[in-house]
Every structure is written in structure tokens, then in C-alpha cells.
Image (spheres, rainbow, N blue to C red):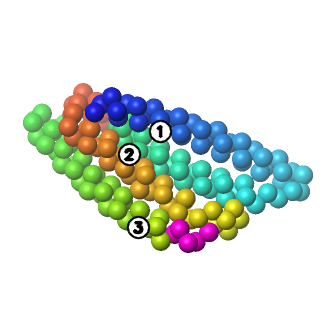
Amino acid sequence: MEKLATILAKILSYLCIIALALLSAIVLVQVVSRFFDVSLPATEELARLLIVWLTFLGSALAIHEKMHLGVRYFVNLASERYQRIIDTLIYVLVAVLLAVLVFYGFSLSMTALTTASATMRLPMAVFYLAIPVSSLFALYFIVVHILNPNQAEQKEASL
């Protein structure tokens, strides 16, 4: 299970790298084209699409890497047994939220199939599918964290 999580995390990392590289290239083309008084309207929409996917896939990857901000001061005051219980409870609550996002995200995507984006005429479902797809990845990572808790990896936020 952990091995599959590692493979999925690598895939997500590569997808995020590709999305960021494409986003950088598209924005560069957009800036250069405006310097020559040429407007490329599809670049703005494509950049927006890449930002949406990059944000959601990156958040799923952050769940795997446990990179989200968390303040553990009060949790660390509890005994190790209660820390595991609190962490599991938090993971279960996040899993419930992610399950809701998967369900309603797919529902939203299916209703958006008939609506097209303004310039590229892509179905808006392409934008909205980022929600349930990334939530599925994040839900899998949460389940892995619940089944294989590692207290040593639980860190306190350093601001």
C-alpha cells in the first residue's frame, strides 16, 4: 500500500512539474505576444486551467508529504496514545470531507459537460474534474496515513 502511494506521489510530482513548466511557457508566450500587440486569448484560459489542476494535484501531493500547515502544540501535550487517537480522528474528518468532494465534484463535472469554456471551447468539466480526481488521490493518501501512522513524521508548524 505504501509502495503504491509512493508511485502515485511520483506521478503527481511529474504532473505538477509538467503543469508548472507548461504554465511558465504559456505565460511567457502571452507576455511576449502582448509586447508585439498580438493577443492570444487561448493562452489565458489554458493558463487558468493549468493553475487549477496544479493547485488541486499539488494539494493531494502535500497530503502525502504531510506538508500542510499544522500546529501540534496542544496535541504534543497529550500522551502518545491520545496523540495517535487525535491524529486518526483528524484523518477521518479529512477523509469524510474528501469523500464529499469526490462525490459532488464528479456530480458537478457531469453537469458541466454540456457547458463549453469561452475561448478554447473545452467542456468545463475539464476544469471541474480537478476537484474529484485530486480528492481521490488525497483520500488514498489519507487512508495510507491512517493504516500506517508514523508519529515521527508529525511535525509542528514553524512560522
Q: Is residue 78 above or below residue 32?
A: above
Residue numbers of the magenta segment:
112-116
Task: Kindly identify the amino acid type of the residue bearing the numbered disc 2.
Answer: Phe
Relative to 133, 26 lies left or right: right
Marks 3 and 2 sit apart, C-alpha to C-alpha, by 17 Å
> Mark 2 = which residue?
137
Estimate the x, y position of residue 3 in percent, counting from the top left. Answer: 33, 28
Estimate the x, y position of residue 131 in percent, counting from the top left. Answer: 44, 56
**Disc marking residue 107:** 3
Image quadrant in which the N terminus is located: top left
Task: Kindly identify the amino acid type of the residue bearing the numbered disc 3.
Answer: Ser
In percent of the image, x 70 and y 57: which residue is there?
44
First in sequence, mark 1 or 3: give its number: 1
> Is residue 46 in view from this perspective?
yes
> Is residue 68 in view from this perspective?
no
As rendered, which of 83 and 108 lies closer to the eye? Answer: 108
Relative to 134, 151 lies left or right: left
Other residues around mark 1 within 10 Å, as few (<14) / some (14–19) / many (≥20):
some
Relative to 127, 119 lies left or right: right
As rendered, which of 151 and 50 lies closer to the eye? Answer: 50
Which image quadrant for residue 24?
top right
> Mark 1 = which residue?
12
Task: Kindly identify the amino acid type of the residue bearing the numbered disc 1.
Answer: Leu
Q: Secondary structure at mark 2?
A: helix
Estimate the x, y position of residue 101 in percent, counting from the top left. Answer: 36, 60
Image depth: mark 1 or mark 3 in front: 3
Marks 1 and 3 sit apart, C-alpha to C-alpha, by 23 Å
In percent of the image, x 41 and y 36: which residue is there?
8
Marks 2 and 1 sit apart, C-alpha to C-alpha, by 9 Å
First in sequence, mark 2 or 1: give its number: 1
Q: Are marks 2 and 1 in contact (CB under 8 Å)?
A: yes
Q: Secondary structure at mark 1?
A: helix
